[in-house]
Amino acid sequence: MTKAYARFLCGTFCAFLFGIGTLHLCLPDRERSDTENRTLQQAPALTAASVADGTFMTETEEYLADQFPGRDGWTGLKARAEQLLGKREFRGVYLCGDTLINRDDEPGEQAERNLDAVRALAERTEIPVYLGLIPGAAEVWQDRLPAGAPRADQAAFIRHAAEKTGLETVDYLGALTAHGNEPVYYRTDHHWTSLGAYYGYAALCQALGEEPEPLEAFSPETVSDRFCGTLYSTSGVHWLPPDTIEYYVQEEGVSVTSWRSGAAEPGVLYDRSYLEKKDQYSSFLGGNQPLCVLENDRAASDRTILLLRDSYADSMAPFLTRTFARVHLIDLRYFHRSPAEYAAENGVDAVVVSYSVQSFVGEKSASLMGR
């Protein structure tokens, strides 16, 4: 290497560092990354306490990484380079052709505590309690995973959960597996699609002895063709085509009441304002909330059901209004009353514990359902 060439490389490198540093100082800090769907670290305050306990240095490192100029482009470039080197797992997400599939955690002690809570709930109430655990794409689409990719055996855990609790179950696994050749999950998100949610609805109806509406009774409306979900955000794999979101159920005749801040307020079956945001899945019911009640006087049955649930129920709830007159949805992350007492006070005919396996095995709030 000649001295001139060495000086050129050194000058180019220094110019790059100087340019990045200048951009970092000149560009305004961003509060949020829509691509990664998360809040970004802001500049930490310099205090004696934060220096002494090390938080200042840690937060400064996170701040510099989060506010790095062109971060979204660099993370996507990094994932692309790793793909060219043969990598197929990106931050716990498998790249399976044009589909992203989350790597699930193995069930541990928290999962057993949650199962104990489900059993305690059933013992506290005379209302029938059903257990429905929704398998993720890693189970239903396991043939799409990279060869040798480790995965949790969700089917085995679902069987174990049924045996330990002794409850009647909703066979989400069988319903989704039977239609595994259809687009029952999003390609860029961990949730089931509206089609997958329909099959879940049908399985729930069958478990409760009701006849589900046939799929042919619905006329799907495509409301977005640019949905890039949580797996797209997490993985850095930003070159896949976006998903589409469909609404199957008409809103007419359905009354929705939400409790977001402790008081009842009018809700919606679909909040279309979210279709202009990154988190388009939250357009179903308007996203996370402690309690939501849906009513339909023209439903096929006059029964009232309560779902203790995670976000998978958001896209299944519209279907449920076609069969059940009243559907109560409780998210235990935000709801702090006894579910058994709530069910008794509101004339509930059946309680369904409806969680994705991935959520159930690690969700600490689920252990509160037996109180």
Image (cartoon, rainbow, N blue to C red):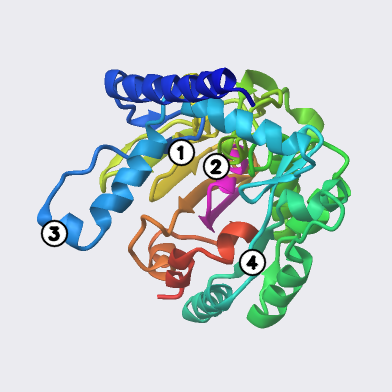
Counting from the top left corner in percent of width and height, residue 66 is at 40, 36
Q: Quadrant of residue 16?
A: top left
Q: Nearer the viewer, residue 155 or 94?
A: 94
Residue interval drawn in magenta: 302-318
Residue 307 sits inside the magenta stretch: yes
Q: Which residue is mark 1?
A: 287
Looking at the image, residue 215 lies above or below residue 56:
above
Q: Secondary structure at mark 4?
A: strand
Counting from the top left corner in percent of width and height, residue 366 is at 48, 66
Q: Disc 3 vs disc 4: Cβ atoms closer than 8 Å?
A: no
Q: Which residue is mark 2?
A: 314
Counting from the top left corner in percent of width and height, residue 219 is at 73, 22
Separation of residues labelled 3 and 2 (CA atoms): 44 Å
Q: Secondary structure at mark 3?
A: helix
Which is nearer the N-term, disc 2 or disc 4?
4
Q: Disc 3 vs disc 1: Cβ atoms closer than 8 Å?
A: no
Foreground label between 3 and 2: 3
Which is nearer the N-term, disc 4 or disc 1?
4
Separation of residues labelled 3 and 4 (CA atoms): 48 Å
Which is nearer the N-term, disc 3 or disc 1?
3
Q: Amino acid at mark 2?
A: Asp
